């Protein structure tokens, strides 16, 4: 009986480094898997990967000032689009960026906000990501949306498309 216990203990002791090694290998593989997205994003000049929970975005915060149309064209010139933030997690990613155009407007139909990918803004998300009272079309041509149009706002506002602002380009990976 004592011999069996010794043998079992020896097996356990000798197996632990193998188990531990596999755990280390698993961690390394997980890190490599996670970093594939980051590596793909980094290969584009000026773009960086941002994460909120399990959600990632490949963004470039353009600090030059452009109106909405020119910002959209500049993003397209580097095979990207103005940022589409159709989830709460994506909104959390863009919160720190100040005075920046995103890919949302009601240029086609007043009051119907569409993302740069052509989809319509969800009403539930709209109530969460816009500053209270926005969008309001205060001026007749407030058809474009910016993130933190003024530094004291932490949400979205509709504003005049001809205003010069920073902008967020997004690479879809």
Image: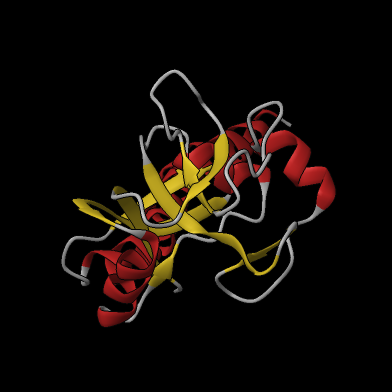
Q: Quadrant of residue 79?
A: bottom left
The residue under the point 65% across, 76% down is 118
Residue at image point 58% right, 54% down: 85
Q: Position of residue 120 (x, y in %)?
A: 74, 66
Q: Relative to the observer, which residue lies in front, 68 or 138?
A: 138
Q: Is residue 18 left or right of residue 165?
A: right
Residue 141 lies in what quarter of the image?
bottom right
Label tally: 0
From this viewpoint, is residue 101 visible?
yes
Residue name at image x 58 percent, y 61 percent: 105
Residue 16 seen anywhere in this rendered image of the structure: no
The quadrant of the rendering that contains the C terminus is bottom left
* Whole-percent x, y for residue 144 in the image: 52, 55
Q: Position of residue 90 (x, y in %)?
A: 56, 48
Give the position of the N terminus as an image quadrant.
Answer: top right
Q: Is residue 73 left or right of residue 142?
A: left
């Amino acid at each position: 009986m004592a011999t069996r216990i010794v043998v079992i203990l020896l097996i356990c002791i000798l197996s632990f480094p193998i188990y531990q090694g596999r755990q280390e290998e698993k961690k390394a593989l997980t890190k490599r898997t996670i970093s594939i997205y980051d590596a793909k994003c980094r290969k584009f000049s000026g773009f960086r990967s941002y994460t909120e929970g399990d959600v990632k975005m490949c963004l470039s915060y353009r600090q030059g000032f452009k109106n909405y149309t020119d910002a959209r064209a500049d993003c397209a010139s580097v095979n990207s689009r103005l940022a589409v933030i159709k989830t709460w997690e994506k909104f959390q990613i863009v919160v720190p960026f100040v005075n920046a155009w995103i890919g949302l407007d009601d240029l086609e139909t007043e009051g119907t906000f569409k993302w740069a990918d052509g989809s319509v803004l969800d009403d539930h998300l709209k109530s969460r990501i816009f500053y209270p009272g926005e969008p309001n079309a205060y001026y007749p041509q407030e058809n474009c949306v910016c993130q933190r149009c003024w530094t004291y706002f932490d949400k979205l506002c509709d504003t005049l498309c001809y205003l010069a602002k920073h902008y967020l380009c997004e690479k879809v990976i």
